[in-house]
Image: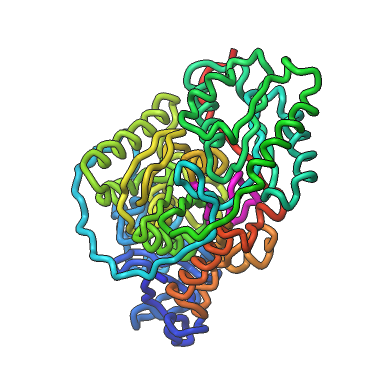
Amino acid sequence: MPTEHNTSSSGRRPAERGARRALVRIAPDDDVAVAVRPLDAGETLTVDGEPLAITGAVPAGHKVALRPLPEGALVRKYGVAIGVATQAIGRGDWVHSHNLATRLDGLQSCAYGPAARAARAELLSVTFEGYRRADGRVGTRNELWVLNTVGCVNHAAERIARSAAERFAGVVDGVHAFGHPYGCSQLGDDLRRTQAVLAGLLRHPNAGGVLVLGLGCENNQIDALLARAGEVDRTRIAFFNSQDVSDELAQGGHVLDALAARAGADRRETCSASDLVLGHKCGGSDGFSGITANPLLGRLADRLTAMGAAVLLSEVPEMFGAEQELMNRCNTEATFNALTALVNDFRRYFIDHGQPVHENPSPGNKAGGLTTLEEKSLGAIQKGGRATVTQVLRYGAPVRGGGLALVEAPGNDGVSSTAMTVAGATLLLFTTGRGTPLGFPVPTIKVSSNSALAARKPHWIDFDAGRLLDGDVTMDEMENDLLAHVLAVASGDRLANNEVHGYREIAIWKDGVTL
């Protein structure tokens, strides 16, 4: 848990177990603290031994000024400026969109200044039970996937998968189709992006077998898609065009029979933590996300990357304002240059479309207490902890080796989560403060930033990080609990809620001409 520097009017220390905090200040020199509960006008709290009078109502998750700030002053949270005061702010004032604005605009100029890396304490190795594939990668599931080259055969793909799921229950971990509306009338980058996503799924280690279902006349031809996938185990892939057979449903069933016989012989084996590939994502964030759930994932990222695992981060626009923090953690100047290009290419993408680079946070984020993109970004990158950035992956590229990998994709939950899955994530950890039912091809563990959401949506939320706000558990204890949860899901001993309730989908990044 971040260091707290406040007490409630009862005088209880916030670090005391069971002490209900009123405010949390994340870094010692922050100008603001976050309200853990709604604060009333006229309420008096104690901060660093001094009374703090709340001047107006402050919703939970929103910011309170800890000191007077003149107009034009930088306002710090996480120890970093999150924006500039647009008017004078008094001690105890609510700090939000009415008096705080972003400083982001245009392209970013950064210098390579690698931060000193602290020596890591010796860590006990952990293992999980996974499916080791011929190329050495390890899956957390052994499923049959039906991928369609074009939206015209979505329904057929779904019917083929649904029928096979009944036949092969207990033989494989599941049979799933991942429909999309693309593949026909696409040109250039749009077609390449569609192929990149499908190729990444085609070679994914969680797929024990893949049927590629085409129509026959689409731009996204099967041969080009297979070439895009590169080296794959052809004994686990089958494909045909629906126009070339008399009954595509019957043909699809026959093909999956053969794939199920191959995949059904696979067995889990004990694998090192270094074989894990996790994707860390946040969506529907609130003012607590950067205090509880995201730092918790960051602790897990530090722990697992130290063991050789890979952790993926995406959502490039939600690095804006926090990119220097990531750049200073790059392992080489080449990685730094790749990250600089990635961030500025994405800024250029916004500018070329006539959009401001700071058009974020979303209305839901703002209602939850996030004001500027800098604030949202600094909270978002907490999911990567302090791990070394070892690689920068363009859209559709596969992860190679361990460490923290940054994946090109927008902030959109569906697109960025799909991009990390395509890069090789075999399990996603998705933090949220406001909630979402979204799930993806791989197990998607939802981590709530507050306990109210976990209580209200138990069929969405797998793990409640909001308990940190009550002082009943420590960050160390929560880290151990989350690691145990992740290993249980990775080993198949536990299902994520998205698997239980059938929340599985993909989203493809589109930006181009449709014929």
Residue that appears at 76% across and 26% down? 251
Please state the total of marks drawn on the protein image.
0
445 in relation to 41, above or below? above
27 in relation to 406, above or below? below
- Of residues 314 and 23, the one nearer the viewer is 314
Work out which quarter of the rendered image holds the N terminus and state it.
Answer: bottom left
- Residue 295 in the image: x percent, y percent? 42, 62
**Residue 216 is covered by the magenta coloring:** no
- Of residues 223 and 279, the one nearer the viewer is 223
- Residue 406 in the image: x percent, y percent? 38, 44
Work out which quarter of the rendered image holds the C terminus and state it.
Answer: top right
Residue that appears at 57% across and 17% down? 186
Please state if 127 lies on the left or on the right of 73 as rendered.
Answer: right
- Residues in magenta, as a range: 425-444
Residue 59 visible somewhere in the drawing: no
Q: Main secondary structure of the magenta part?
A: loop
The quarter of the displayed image where residue 340 is located: top left
The quarter of the displayed image where residue 184 is located: top right
Residue that appears at 29% across and 55% down? 73
**Residue 428 is covered by the magenta coloring:** yes
Please state if 347 lies on the left or on the right of 147 as rendered.
Answer: left
- Residue 135 in the image: x percent, y percent? 46, 41
Residue 249 visible somewhere in the drawing: yes
111 in relation to 276, above or below? above
- Of residues 381 and 139, the one nearer the viewer is 139
Residue that appears at 69% across and 41% down? 260
- Residue 280 in the image: x percent, y percent? 47, 52
Please state if 230 lies on the left or on the right of 391 as rendered.
Answer: right
